[in-house]
Image (spheres, rainbow, N blue to C red):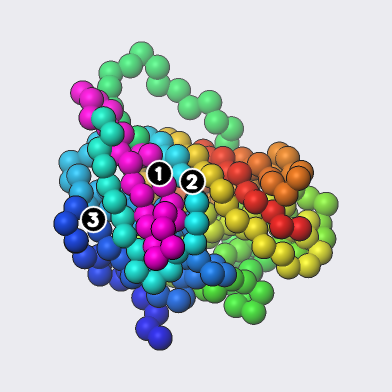
């Protein structure tokens, strides 16, 4: 079975009427479905293919509604296009129906008397001192497409009492450097509560809200620092706060996820 890289999957996209179609090779699977970060990235890629002059992406609201693999189809629709802000809906369908739904909010820069960054500075861990998590025998299949180093927290399935993690992550695909590629990275960290598990059990992202804080999506050597902090875990669900910094310590994404936990 051929293994397509991240950029090969995007480059092989084909148009069918107004839809964008992609083929997901098995190296991108997470259990019985494609990796959620890839499905999110395909939604943004399809929106950009359909509407070529969109302003910068400001926020995204994802719902991961069902499994999909093999050929998937992205249906794109402009919900509203205003003077500065455009709302674009994307539905990603597989052979079992709707897999991912997102509303993307794009906004042109406007003059404002406010120009402040209230986020706290982050200490950048030395990657050479971090624990490698690059072990195919202990990871889902898709994780082999990334390099991952644990900077804070404990490894998954270690029975830890911690509920936060920091990870250095980058695509192995050297051409994956834009915002679409960053979406592919941003869902890569396992849920923060997974380190609390004492044995393997399924987890699944349900919803994901993201705010994009800068227009310049760049970082050194494709490395991103990602933090996940679980705030709540009960009744089979976990709520977590997520942040993404570039290699200079600039906060690029602020996000939240709700995760289904079968443990």
Q: Which residue is mark 1?
A: 102
Along the line of sight, which residue is nearer the eye, 155 or 100? 100
Label 3 and label 2: CA atoms lie apart by 19 Å
Q: Residue at x 43, y 68 (%)?
A: 69
Q: Earlier in the sequence, mark 3 or mark 2?
A: 3
The image quadrant that residue 99 belongs to is bottom left
Q: Position of residue 114 (x, y in %)?
A: 40, 17
Q: Which residue is mark 3?
A: 19
**Proximity of marks 2 and 1: CB atoms separated by less than 8 Å:** yes
Which residues, given as a range, are shown in magenta?
Answer: 81-104
Is disc 3 surrounded by few (<14), some (14 to 19) or many (20+) residues within 10 Å? some
* Magenta-drawn stretch, dominant element (helix, strand or loop): strand
Q: Earlier in the sequence, mark 2 or mark 1?
A: 2
Along the line of sight, which residue is nearer the eye, 78 or 144? 78
Farthest residue to the front: give it. Answer: 96
The count of marks equals 3
Label 3 and label 1: CA atoms lie apart by 15 Å
Q: Within the magenta stretch, is there residue 91?
A: yes
Disc 2 is placed on an element classified as: strand
Q: Which residue is mark 2?
A: 63
Disc 1 is placed on an element classified as: strand
Look at the image and tell me whether residue 84 can be seen.
yes
Label 2 and label 1: CA atoms lie apart by 6 Å
């Amino acid at each position: 079975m051929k293994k397509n890289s991240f950029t090969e999957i995007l480059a092989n996209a084909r148009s069918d009427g107004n839809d964008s179609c992609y083929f997901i090779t098995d190296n991108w699977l997470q259990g019985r479905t494609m990796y959620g970060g890839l499905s999110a990235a395909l939604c943004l890629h399809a929106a950009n293919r359909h509407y070529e002059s969109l302003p910068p992406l400001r926020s995204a609201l994802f719902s991961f509604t069902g499994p999909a693999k093999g050929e998937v189809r992205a249906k794109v629709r402009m919900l509203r296009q205003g003077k500065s802000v455009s709302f674009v809906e994307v539905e990603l369908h597989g052979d079992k129906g709707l897999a991912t739904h997102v509303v993307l909010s794009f906004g042109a820069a406007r003059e404002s008397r406010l120009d402040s960054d209230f986020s706290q500075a982050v200490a950048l861990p030395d990657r050479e001192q971090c624990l490698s998590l690059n072990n195919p025998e202990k990871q889902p299949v898709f994780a082999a497409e990334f390099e991952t180093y644990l900077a804070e927290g404990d490894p998954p399935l270690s029975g830890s009492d911690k509920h936060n993690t920091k990870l250095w992550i980058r695509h192995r695909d050297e051409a994956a450097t834009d915002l679409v590629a960053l979406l592919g990275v941003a869902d890569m960290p396992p849920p923060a509560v997974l380190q609390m598990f004492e044995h393997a059990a399924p987890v699944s992202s349900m919803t994901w809200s993201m705010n994009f804080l800068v227009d310049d999506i760049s970082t050194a050597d494709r490395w991103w620092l990602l933090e996940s902090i679980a705030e709540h875990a009960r009744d089979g669900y976990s709520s977590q706060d997520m942040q993404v910094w570039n290699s200079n310590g600039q906060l690029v994404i602020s996000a939240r996820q709700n995760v289904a936990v079968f443990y």
